[in-house]
C-alpha cells in the first residue's frame, strides 16, 4: 500500500497510549490527550488549532438520556484469599483492569467473609463472588443486599466461534464497570475483576464454607470534567466541516479499544496538515458517550454540526490473532447515503488481496449502536462507523499493542483519507459506481414499502437520500399511505447504553433482535421522519426483521418514556 499513511507510526502511537489507564475524567486520560497534542505540535502543527471542551463529571448531570459519572481513577488495589488458606488473587500491580471501574476504597486492610452470589438476598458486610452482569450484581448485592465487596468474573460479548469465552481464556482479566453516579458512588463498594482460573479457586473454597478474602483498595472518585480534544486538522475556514471521531478513553492497555482509533485519527490530522488539505476537517477525541453526546449537542446548539462524520473505533486488530473482522456500520436509510457509500467502496478497493483473492475479512452491517457515531446519527448527521468485531480480547488486559496489525491500520486509514479526497477531487468513475449501488438499494426499499402504512412519509425522503430521482416515475403510483401516528424522540441525541439494562429478559428472548441498535435507529428516524408507522417499516426493512417485533420494541420504548407518540 501507499505510504501516504504509515501503519508503523500509528502503531507506535498505540504503544504510547496503551501505557495510560485512560479512564474518563482521570489524570491519565488528560495526560494521554496532551501526549497526542504534543506529538502533533512537534510535527509542526499550529498550536492555535487545538481546542479542549469540558463537560461535567459530577455524577448528577444528565445530558439527554445519559447520566454523568464521577471522575474515577484507581490508585491501588490488592485481593487475597485469606481462609481457609492464604492465596494471592490479583492486584493493580499485576493488571490495571483488576480493579473494576467505579470501585470505592477500603478502610485500610479489610477481611471479609466470601459468599456466592445467588440473586437478591442479604449480603451485608460480605464479599460476593459472582459471574453475572456487574450492574445487576451491584443492584442486587450492594444496593439491596448491603455487600461490601464484589469479586466478579464476567465476559461481555462472548463468541465461542472465535475462542472468546471464559473457558477458552481462563487467564484473561476482563475490564468491568459498576455504576458510579453520585448516588451509587456514595455506597463506596469495592469491586475486583478476576480471571476464570482464580474465580474457580475462590468458588471451590466458597462452596466448602468459611472462606474469606482480604483486600486493600484506594481510588479517587471526585467531581471533575470530561475533556474532548478538538483538532482542526486543516485550518481551512470556508464551507462546512467533516468530522472524524474516536474515543480516547478505556483502561490500559486498551490497544484496539480504543487507542487504535485515537492514534489513527491523530495521524490522519498530521497528514492532512502536511498536505495542506483544502477542506475543513476536524478531529474529535472524546470520552465515549459521556463526552461525544454533550459535544455533539453543543455543536448543534451553535449551528456547527458537520456535514458527515467518520467514527474510528477498534480499527487496528490483527485478524489472525484476534479472530476479528473489519466492519462498516451503515448509515440509516433515513439519512443521506453518498458518503457512507463512498467510504464502503474505498474500503473494498483497498482490501488487501493477492491475484484478486481477498486476504482480509470485511463485512457491512446495518446501523449498529454502541459508539460515538450514534451521538451524531440521532441528530441527523450521516456517521458511518469503522471497527473490528467480534474480537477475542475485547475489553481485557489481553488487548495489547502486540495484537495490532500495521497493514490493517493502513487499510482503514487510507479508506478514510481516500473518502476525504472526494471532497476536493471527485472521481467520476467512483461516483458512478456509488450511484449505481444507491439506485439498486433504493429500488429494493421502494418495492418493499410500496402501498404500506407510512410509505408516503418515506417516498420523497428516500429518493433524496439515495439520489434516485430516476426512479420517481416508476413508483409514483404505488398507492403509498401516510403514517397514522406521530413519533418523536423524548431525548436529543443517542439513548446511550445504560437503558439497555432495563430491557426485560423475556422480551430479549421473545424478540431475538438487536434491540439496542434498532432502538437508536428508531430515535434518529423519529427525529427525521416523525411518523411511527414509517419509522417501524423502515427499521424492519433495514434490519430484515418482522415489523411486529419492531412494533413491540417501539411500544415498550414509548411506555418507558424513551419515545413519544
Image (cartoon, rainbow, N blue to C red):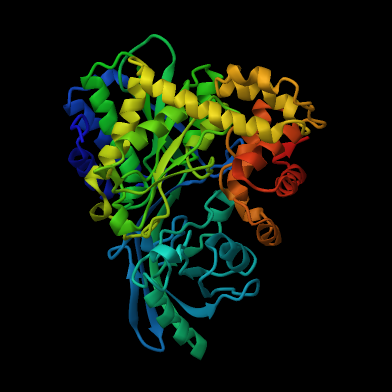
Judged left or right of residue 229, residue 499 is right
**Circle count:** 0
Q: Is residue 88 above or below residue 182?
A: below
Judged left or right of residue 24, residue 277 is left
Q: Is residue 213 above or below residue 101?
A: below
Q: Is residue 162 above or below residue 553?
A: below
Residue 232, percent across and down?
33, 21
| Quadrant of the rendered image containing residue 419 | top left
Front residue of 298/172: it is: 172
Whether residue 106 appears in this view of the structure is no
Front residue of 238/366: it is: 366
Q: Quadrant of the N terminus?
A: top left
| Quadrant of the rendered image containing residue 263 | top left
Front residue of 235/202: it is: 235
Residue plotted at (69% across, 41% down): 562
Front residue of 220/6: it is: 6
Residue plotted at (41% across, 27% down): 342
Whether residue 314 appears in this view of the structure is yes
Residue plotted at (66% across, 36% down): 538
Residue 356, percent across and down?
28, 42
Residue 525, percent across and down?
65, 32
| Quadrant of the rendered image containing residue 137 | bottom right
Q: Is residue 288 above or below residue 199?
A: above
Q: Point out the residue furthest to the right here.
A: 484
Residue plotted at (47% across, 21% down): 306
Q: Quadrant of the C terminus?
A: top right
Residue 30, percent across and down?
33, 39
Amino acid at each position: 500500500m501507499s505510504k501516504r499513511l504509515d501503519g508503523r507510526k500509528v502503531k507506535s502511537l498505540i504503544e504510547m497510549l496503551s501505557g495510560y489507564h485512560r479512564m474518563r475524567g482521570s489524570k491519565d486520560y488528560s495526560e494521554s490527550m496532551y501526549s497526542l497534542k504534543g506529538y502533533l505540535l512537534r510535527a509542526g502543527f499550529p498550536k492555535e488549532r487545538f481546542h479542549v471542551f469540558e463537560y461535567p463529571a459530577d455524577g448528577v448531570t444528565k445530558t439527554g438520556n445519559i447520566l454523568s459519572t464521577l471522575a474515577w481513577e484507581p490508585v491501588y488495589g490488592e485481593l487475597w484469599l485469606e481462609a481457609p488458606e492464604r492465596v494471592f488473587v490479583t492486584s493493580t500491580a499485576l493488571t490495571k483492569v483488576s480493579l473494576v471501574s467505579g470501585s470505592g476504597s477500603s478502610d485500610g486492610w479489610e477481611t471479609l467473609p466470601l459468599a456466592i452470589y445467588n440473586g437478591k438476598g442479604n449480603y451485608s458486610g460480605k464479599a460476593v463472588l459472582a459471574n453475572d452482569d456487574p450492574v445487576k450484581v451491584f443492584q442486587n448485592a450492594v444496593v439491596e443486599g448491603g455487600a461490601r465487596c464484589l469479586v466478579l468474573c464476567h465476559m461481555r460479548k462472548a463468541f465461542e466461534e472465535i475462542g472468546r469465552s471464559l473457558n477458552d481464556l481462563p487467564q484473561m482479566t476482563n475490564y468491568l464497570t459498576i455504576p458510579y453516579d453520585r448516588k451509587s458512588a456514595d455506597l463506596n463498594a469495592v469491586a475486583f475483576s478476576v480471571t476464570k482460573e482464580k474465580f474457580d479457586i475462590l468458588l471451590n473454597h466458597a462452596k466448602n464454607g468459611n472462606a474469606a478474602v482480604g483486600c486493600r483498595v484506594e481510588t479517587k472518585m471526585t467531581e471533575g470534567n470530561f475533556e474532548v480534544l478538538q483538532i482542526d486538522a486543516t485550518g481551512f475556514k470556508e464551507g462546512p466541516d467533516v468530522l472524524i471521531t474516536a474515543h480516547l478513553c478505556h483502561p490500559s492497555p486498551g490497544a484496539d479499544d480504543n487507542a487504535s482509533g485515537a492514534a489513527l485519527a491523530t495521524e490522519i490530522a498530521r497528514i492532512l496538515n502536511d498536505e495542506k488539505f483544502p477542506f475543513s476537517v476536524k478531529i474529535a477525541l472524546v470520552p465515549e458517550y459521556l463526552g461525544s453526546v454533550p459535544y455533539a449537542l453543543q455543536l448543534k446548539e451553535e449551528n456547527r454540526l458537520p456535514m458527515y462524520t467518520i467514527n474510528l473505533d477498534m480499527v487496528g486488530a490483527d485478524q489472525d490473532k484476534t479472530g476479528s473482522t473489519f466492519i462498516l456500520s451503515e448509515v440509516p436509510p433515513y439519512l443521506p447515503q453518498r458518503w457512507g457509500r463512498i467510504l464502503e467502496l474505498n474500503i473494498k478497493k483497498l482490501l488487501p488481496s493477492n491475484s484478486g483473492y481477498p486476504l482480509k475479512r470485511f463485512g457491512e452491517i446495518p446501523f449498529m449502536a454502541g459508539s460515538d457515531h450514534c451521538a451524531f446519527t440521532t441528530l441527523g448527521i450521516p456517521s458511518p462507523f469503522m471497527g473490528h468485531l467480534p474480537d477475542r480480547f475485547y475489553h481485557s488486559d489481553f488487548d495489547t499493542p502486540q495484537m495490532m496489525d500495521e497493514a490493517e491500520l493502513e487499510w482503514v486509514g487510507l479508506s478514510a483519507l481516500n473518502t476525504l479526497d472526494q471532497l476536493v477531487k471527485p472521481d467520476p468513475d467512483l461516483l458512478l459506481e456509488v450511484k449505481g449501488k444507491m439506485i439498486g438499494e433504493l429500488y429494493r426499499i421502494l418495492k418493499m414499502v410500496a402501498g404500506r402504512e407510512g410509505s408516503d412519509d418515506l417516498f420523497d425522503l428516500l429518493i433524496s437520500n439515495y439520489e434516485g430521482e430516476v426512479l420517481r416515475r416508476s413508483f409514483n403510483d404505488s398507492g403509498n399511505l401516510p403514517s397514522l401516528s406521530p413519533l418523536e424522540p423524548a431525548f436529543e441525541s443517542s439513548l446511550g447504553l445504560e437503558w439497555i439494562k432495563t430491557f426485560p429478559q423475556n422480551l430479549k428472548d421473545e424478540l431475538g433482535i438487536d434491540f439496542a441498535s434498532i432502538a437508536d435507529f428508531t430515535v434518529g428516524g423519529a427525529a427525521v421522519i416523525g411518523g411511527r408507522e414509517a419509522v417501524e417499516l423502515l427499521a424492519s426493512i433495514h434490519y430484515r426483521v418482522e415489523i411486529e417485533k419492531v412494533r413491540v420494541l417501539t411500544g415498550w420504548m414509548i411506555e418507558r418514556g424513551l419515545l413519544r407518540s
